[in-house]
Amino acid sequence: MNNTKLVFKTGKAGFVLTAALVVVLAECGGSAHAQAVRIIVTPPVIVVPPPPVVVVAPPVVVVAPDNYVYYPSYGVYYNTTRHQYAYLRDSAWVSAPTPFGVSAEVVLASPSVVMDFHDDPSHHHDEMLRRYPRNWAPDRSHDGDHDRDRDGDRDRDHDDHKR
């Protein structure tokens, strides 16, 4: 019983070709140690983000003009912006939180004049001494005139309604 089926029917030539193929494949497999194997690995790319940009704005500076009130009885200027007193002492200008030789309450209760300059009082002091001597007081002779005029207007309006 011969149940063997051959897939290929080969003759002598097929046998020789198959044997030659086996030899060639064996030779290639046997010489693998002589072949150089090179593996190329590219270096990783590292992306570093740039440092954050920090913008520092300059501080806001509010400049308020210096405003002065002059107290002629004491020759003292009060800077209402800086809350400082300015005065002449021993031929030098002084700026201090309190006046010299008298309390702030006494100075503030004395007659005063609001100044119309905003720079240093030393630039205007000679003129202020001429305008406002130490014994200067505000002119109050017309203080009652306003009330008298108002009363006269009221009386005149009242007389108009009677007619």
Image (cartoon, rainbow, N blue to C red):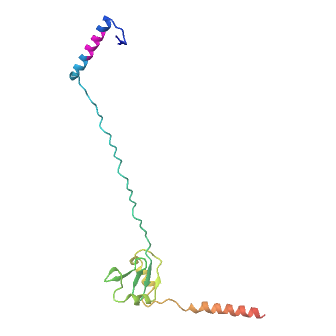
* Secondary structure, magenta segment, majority class: helix
**Left or right of 82, for residue 140:** right
85 versus 14 height, above or below: below
Give the camera-side residue of 10 and 134: 10
106 versus 114 height, above or below: below
Give yes or no for residue 21 being in the magenta stretch: yes
Give the camera-side residue of 29 and 13: 13
Q: Position of residue 67 (x, y in %)?
A: 44, 77
Specify the segment rendered in magenta. 17-25
Q: Position of residue 104 (x, y in %)?
A: 39, 87
Q: Residue at position x 30%, y 9% from top? A: 17
Q: Quadrant of residue 65?
A: bottom left
Q: Position of residue 92 (x, y in %)?
A: 32, 80
Would residue 156 be visible to someone looking at this image?
yes
Residue lying furthest top: 12
Give the camera-side residue of 139 and 55: 55
Q: Residue at position x 34%, y 86% from top? A: 100
Q: Quadrant of the N terminus?
A: top left
Q: Quadrant of the C terminus?
A: bottom right
Give yes or no for residue 7 being in the magenta stretch: no
